[in-house]
Amino acid sequence: MYRFLDLFAGCGGMSLGFTYAGFDLRGGIEVDSTAIKTHANNFFRHSDESTLKRHSVSQDITKLSPEKFMKEILCETNPFGLIDVIVGGPPCQAFARIGRAKLREIMDHPEAFLTDERASMYLHYLRYVEFFRPLAIVIENVPDIMNYGGTNIAEGIAFSLEKIGYESRYTIMNSAHYGVPQMRQRFFLMATRKDLEIIPEFPMCTHYVKLPQGYCNAHMVALGGIEMPTLFNSESIKHHYITPPKLDPNLPEAVSVQQALHDIPPINVGSITKGARKFNKLAKYSDHGQISDYAKLMRQWPKFESKEGIFDHVTRYLPRDYKIFRKMNPGDQYPEAYKIAEQIFEKALTEYELITGISLQKHSSQFEELRAKFVPPYDPGKFPNKWRKMEADAPSRTLTAHIGKDTYSHIHYDSEQSRVISVREAARLQSFPDGFKFEGAMNAAFKQIGNAVPPLQAFAIAVKLKQLLDKAFLTKKQNHESEKLEYIVTKS
């Protein structure tokens, strides 16, 4: 069983996918105190009290050396052969601002991390790679990493990894092509140690969906950085990008929002009130006919089973907007919602004037006060994507950390419910199983979910990586046996 670390672990999307594929999680590092508690309480909940406590403490990787992490969290003293794989999604912004000479200096002299405040999170990630020397690593990020401010940061990472003995490849993958009911486009880099003599590969797609033009455009923008100078070269060089796995229209259709959510009980907006949302009330499953294979997996995920229902089926209190949600069509965004809100307001204004006999002057304080009860304050020309009503028969659009602030980007497809998604529905769209529990309040849970790598996509990558590693070791074993046989034959 391959042992792995999850750096910048968040609540554990990558950890969940890799453990599901049979990898052994040894620990994670995360600076968010709520997210690391979620991580620990899901992956170390059966450990003894002291172990759970160690893994529940938030850590700033810029202040935690690999050696200290090994000794204090892993309770080990020798890094040799201790960790087989390191995964994670470190932020990239600072990386683009560090000069080439400084990066070379840091790679040559790791102690420079202690004195150079510009050192980025990626370089701290690479410091852990250099310390533990794992067989392989996996890095996840946004596609813009390939074209950030006119710089191909991905090549800078590949350059650094090559210098310390790794073979790298990177690509862009969409989670909907791997069984996740969400169109989420992300950059993935896989690197393997050169002594394994294997070239990194990415998993074949398992599901088909034709992506909206916006996703295709974003991909093309990222590809525009392929031939750009890297952080280490003033001229373009041979890159490590490979085209995404081929998408076959004959594959099963991507999991739709309705397939993902149809067994989750409806919420009557009349029952939603102000106040804190607690995850202590059981919402029993709605089994109207046969549930989808996806819903079954979410209920039956090994070690995260849920039999009766869910405890975090809570959503936001948005009384102004329920009528708008109800009238929106699937796929409608903020401009359409704004028009609907204006129509609702005009009707309310007419009724008010008929009842009171008072004609409100446009833009008067009374007029604006009444209007604010029905119409959102955002300019539809500036925020066209702020709202969106999901389509039942397609995967959802991308969940982001912004859902920790509001969930207008994911309005429920069921007009009868006329609401935004709940915490558990967001988790379903991200492919977290129902038995996976989130720590903190509602907003914190939403943020953790939006920040996560979809577990099913991580699982697909983990399965492929395991195949590559198994094949490498089998080949080396066979070569070793043939060398022994050749030696015996020669001697005889």
Image (spheres, rainbow, N blue to C red):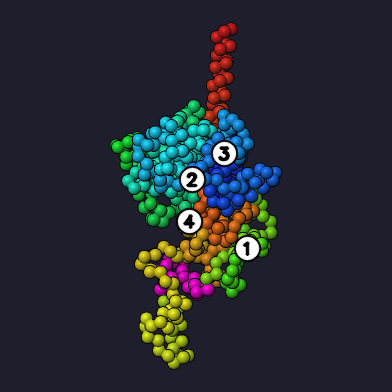
The amino acid marked with disc number 4 is Thr
The amino acid marked with disc number 2 is Gly
Mark number, residue 400? 4
The amino acid marked with disc number 1 is Lys
Q: Residue at x 43, y 86 (%)?
A: 350
In primary-sequence order, the first of circles 3 and 1 is 3
Rendering coords of residue 86 (x, y %): 53, 38
Q: Quadrant of residue 84?
A: top right
Q: Which residue is mark 1?
A: 278
Q: Residue at x 59, y 30 (%)?
A: 78
Task: Say whether residue 352 is left or right of residue 101.
Answer: right
Spatial CA distance of label 2 from label 1 is: 30 Å
In primary-sequence order, the first of circles 4 and 1 is 1
Q: Which residue is mark 2?
A: 89
Query: SS class of the residue under badge 4?
Result: loop
Q: Which residues are magenta?
A: 319-340
Q: Which residue is mark 3?
A: 69
Q: Residue at x 37, y 81 (%)?
A: 363
Crowd class of label 4 (few under 14; some 14 to 19; many from 20; radius 10 Å):
some
